[in-house]
Image (cartoon, grey):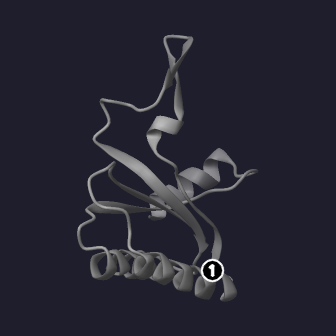
Amino acid sequence: MRYMFLTSGVENGAPPPSQRMIDEIEKLSEREMAAGRMIARGGLMPTAMGARIESRRGQLKTTDGPFAETKEVLGGFAIFEFATREEALAAAQSFMELHREHWPEWEGVCEMRPMFGFGATAAAIVDEASQA
């Protein structure tokens, strides 16, 4: 099953990651891609460079960043293929351990979520969700 890891933290809440941290993430990514588990990954630029498009009461509203009301922001993502939830959970814990070890000033969250793909039926989605 595919899993998306969403990493979030307080924007400007810690100094930038050290080169050592970046190197360790690169090593992890290379290893996971070579093993065929990591499908995609990416970091996100600051919210000041983005925009939000909301749908409320049938109307669209665009707001340019930064977003003052936001306490935590999405900082990056990765998509993996794992055989079991336990394998995905162990990978997420290992990823966060890198942060703890090499960037202790950073405080944040890695949310691990199973994915469903295009072409999935509503019944299959409900079935997968009930098994989680």
- Residue 17 placed where, x, y %? 38, 68
Q: Which residue is mark 1?
A: 37
Neighbor class of circle 1 (other Cα within 10 Å; few <14, some 14-19, many 20+) is some
Q: Is residue 102 left or right of residue 124?
A: left
- Choose top left, top right, bottom left or bottom right for residue 104: bottom left
- Residue 63 placed where, x, y %? 49, 22
Whether residue 69 is visible, yes or no, is: yes
- Which quarter shows the N terminus? bottom right
- Residue 69 placed where, x, y %? 30, 30
List the single residue furthest toward the right.
119
Q: Residue at x 38, y 46 (%)?
A: 73
33 over 119 or under it: above or below: below
Q: Residue at x 52, y 83 (%)?
A: 28
Q: Amino acid at mark 1?
A: Arg
Q: Is residue 89 left or right of residue 39?
A: left
Q: Nearer the viewer, residue 71 or 20?
A: 20
Identify the element where label 1 is drawn. loop
Q: How many marks?
A: 1
69 over 103 or under it: above or below: above
- Residue 58 placed where, x, y %? 55, 11
Q: Is residue 132 left or right of residue 70?
A: right
- Which quarter shows the C terminus? bottom left
Q: Residue at x 55, y 57 (%)?
A: 127
75 over 70 or under it: above or below: below
Whether residue 2 is visible, yes or no, is: no
Q: Residue at x 66, y 81 (%)?
A: 33
